[in-house]
Image: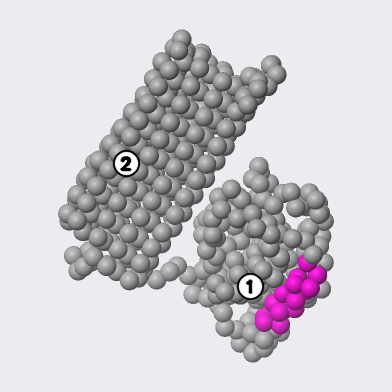
Amino acid sequence: MKQQGMALPTVLMVFAVLSLVFLTTAAVLLTDLTGQQQTYADIEAQYDAEGQAETLIALLDQENIENENSEDDVISEIEDKAELAGAEDFFFTNNENDAEIFAVNFLGSAAVTGTSDAESTYNLRVELFMNIESRTINEQTTYHLDEWGLTRWERDRGFGENVSDSVDPGGENGGHEPPPPSAEECDPTSGSYFAGNCIFTDWVTLSHDEDFEVEGFSEFQSTVIMRDRSQLTIGDDLTFENELSADNDTKIDAGDNAIFLGELTTGDRFDLTVDGQTNFENDVNIQNDASLTLESSADFIGEFDAGDRLEMEVKSTASFYNLVSIGHGADIQFNQDAVFHDELTVNSNSEGTIQGEAVFHDDVTFSADSNITLEKDAEFSGDLNLGPQTVLTIEGDASFHGSVLANQTAQIIVCGNVEGYNEADDCG
């Protein structure tokens, strides 16, 4: 970011002093998202190597905080170091919830306030993002930061707005938000490979066996049709603003977030991989032998109807707001919490694991010969129905607010307490 007069040297001097103070005085070891111990120097070197020398992120897990310093001590320490580095103004944004870590985000580039002449005041804005959902340690995700040190998830939800007026006030958007990435309207009939960011305004039809690739982000504003064995690969964010209809043996790979605003309808053997967050804002209807691999959180706003032998993994939180119906022989895994706001039906011969807390707000049916494991607490607000030979294992506490209708050959194993009345069972 270019400034007039002595602005750039002053920015670099402020950031250099801050970096030096942190590198020479920080004694607390940090735990990164992979569980490895890192020092401030290690983290700074990592971001230097990624071309993000102006951004320093320190990730501390809750155990280190409790062992070394209280949260108030950490905040006080940052304030003291910011003052020593010459920062005249800073603030903290606390978002307290039940997440497992907090991220301390140092915006290394100084922000300009007031006028743009040589007498401008340079402030270092230091933001403490406390327990933000998109930075929970269980996600183990690499976050791409903009020039303000914000993830796209945070920026889209308004975090950092209180510093926007002091960042690049002469920018084309008045400093209120970073300029959107450049994109152009692309013609899908001109080829199957696009190197930049693309907006497709007309219908897009992928022919049989076609490999269609966009290196950047993509917005499909009209209906998309994928014929048999076609493949869609997007390097960054992917948005379908209208219906997506896919035939048999189709595949979609999104390099970052994916949003499905219209209905998703597929044939057999549909394969979807999303490296970022996934939002299904409308109904999802997929046929047999589908595979869904969602590397971050997933929200299903509409109905979710899947055929037989579904393989599905959601590596962060999963929320279903409408009816969920899953066919026979499914293999489902949720690596964090899962919440079902409407009825859930899982048909026979299925396997399912929820590693976080499980909340069922409506009726639940697990049909015959299924094996369901809930590794933490589980709450059933509606009726629970278990078919023959089905085993439901709850490794934490369980609460049942509706009826429990289980076949005489079914089993319910609760390792913790049932609504707080009994002692924990020995589950081995």
Above or below — where is 419 with respect to 35?
Answer: above
Residue shown at the point (40%, 35%) measured from the top left: 331
Q: Quadrant of residue 368?
A: top left
- Estimate how packed mark 1 is, as few (under 14), some (14 to 19) or many (20 or more) residues with alpha carbons within 10 Å: some
The circle drawn on residue 217 is none
- The C terminus is located in which quarter? top right
Q: Is residue 418 magenta?
A: no
Q: Quadrant of residue 154?
A: bottom right
The circle drawn on residue 290 is 2
Q: What amino acid type is highlighted by mark number 2?
A: Ala
Counting residues from the start of the chain, the first of labels 1 and 2 encountered is: 1
Above or below — where is 99 with respect to 231?
Answer: above
Residue shown at the point (60%, 61%) measured from the top left: 161
Q: Which residues are magenta?
A: 11-26
Decide if residue 325 is in sight here.
no
| Nearer to us in this view, 342 or 22 | 22
Numbered marks: total = 2
Q: Position of residue 158 (x, y in %)?
A: 56, 56
Q: Residue furthest bottom?
A: 5
Q: Residue furthest front?
A: 428
Q: At numbered mark 2, what does the secondary structure look like: helix, strand or loop?
A: loop
